[in-house]
Amino acid sequence: MSDKYKYDLRGVSATKDEVHAAIKGLDKGLYPNAFCKILPDIAANDPDYCNLMHADTAGTKTSLAYLYWRETGNLDVWKGIAQDAIVMNLDDMACVGATQGILLSSTIGRNKRLIPGEVISTLINAASEFVEELRPYGIDVHLSGGETADVGDIVRTIDVGYTAFARLKRSDLIVNDIQEGDVIVGLASYGQANYESAYNGGMGSNGLTSARHDVLNSFYADQYPESYDGKMPTEVAYVGMKRLTDPVHIPGLDQPLDVGRLILSPTRTYLPVIQQLLDELRPHLHGMIHCTGGGQTKVSKFVQDRHIIKDNLLPVPPLFELIQEQSNTSWREMYQVFNMGHRLEVYLPEAQADTVIDIARSFNIDAQRIGRVEAGKGAQVTIKSSKGEFNY
């Protein structure tokens, strides 16, 4: 079965072509090449400032959290979901230089029959804790409340999202201007940063429909039919071999992690690292890419006539080896759906690359030069790895 056909049967898309086509005619803001849409300073009408508003969710990762919570009774898994939804906003915004004065509002829709108040309380408290954990690193975020709705008619279990707003000086913006001759420094998505409490498998909040159904076995379709679309063909619903509590041995860790915890690793925030990059290297930063939807091809949306060559990638972490093994997804598609080991890319001159690497490693995050930028026709991405060479 082709990867595309499998995605279609599950009602998802690796490339979101229809979504991009739907918004193609919309205004792209003041700086079309910026990682986030930048608006005029509507708040105060100051020509030296700009506004940005960003919205995102934890996606279908909530369905996996639901399964794990139901199987183990562990409420802590919901803390990671709050972080997922927040980071998918904040790290995107950080890629344009926004780390201060950020307002954050939640939108949570639940099926009250299945999701009790203790889950909601855990999510809300976790958001507050996460924001406070960022403050020592100079990240200024304020929770402004939100909406929690009982919408069981349209939500099978729970949906968790956030909207963020920031106002900043236009002179402080990082607008992608990725140049021929730039090097690319990749920052690992896996391991344990010194501001994280446990090993991170490297999962963000993309590709979870594939990961869930390709890795977990049919027990979950039978036991928890509310965790997925019942109209999904059985040939693509929970077709893996694993149970949530099956152990996975991670090199360097004394104890194995279970499959559920590994896939549910909270989306790593790079905010502490990015804040230091902005403080020390802002004039030299030609671009920062948060490798979310589109995985390793994400950068193609922000370049013209550039050939992005990634030929020295970080090792593929055990999590993505597991997903590929269970799903038999082509490696070409894996690099297009998942971050595959690094979720932040920094584009800058060769002379400053070591500074980025040193800053990342000071937070116990592995980093290295993963590639370079050459002239090209249109937007091209080439990946050369131990898994093969792939052109996009």
Image (spheres, helix red, strand yellow):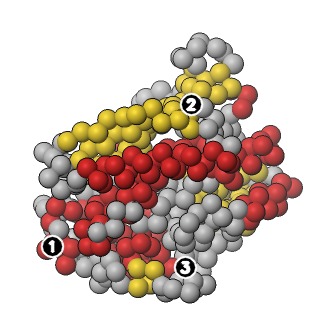
In the image as oriented, which residue stretches furthest toward the right?
351
- First in sequence: mark 2 or mark 1? 2
In the displayed structure, would residue 212 be above or below residue 140? below
Mark 1 sits on what residue? 223
| Residue 300 seen by the camera | no
Query: Which residue does the image show at 42% across and 57% down from the upper left?
Result: 79
365 or 231: nearer the viewer:
365
Q: SS class of the residue under badge 3?
A: loop
The amino acid type, in three-letter code, at marker 2 is Ala
In the displayed structure, would residue 326 be above or below residue 335? below
- First in sequence: mark 3 or mark 2? 2
Please indicate whether residue 202 sits to the left or right of residue 120 in the image. Answer: right
Quick check: marks 2 and 1 in contact, CB under 8 Å?
A: no
Please indicate whether residue 176 sits to the left or right of residue 21 in the image. Answer: right
Residue 28 position within the rendered picture, expressed as x and y whole percent measured from the top left: 51, 30
The amino acid type, in three-letter code, at marker 1 is Gln
Quadrant position of residue 150: top left
198 or 125: nearer the viewer:
125
Q: CA distance from mark 3 to mark 2?
A: 40 Å
Residue 125 position within the rendered picture, expressed as x and y whole percent measured from the top left: 42, 48
Circle on res. 166? 2
| Residue 261 seen by the camera | yes
Which callout, 1 or 3, points to the residue nearer the camera? 1
Q: SS class of the residue under badge 2?
A: strand
286 or 304: nearer the viewer:
286
Mark 3 sits on what residue? 387
Q: CA distance from mark 1 to mark 3?
A: 36 Å
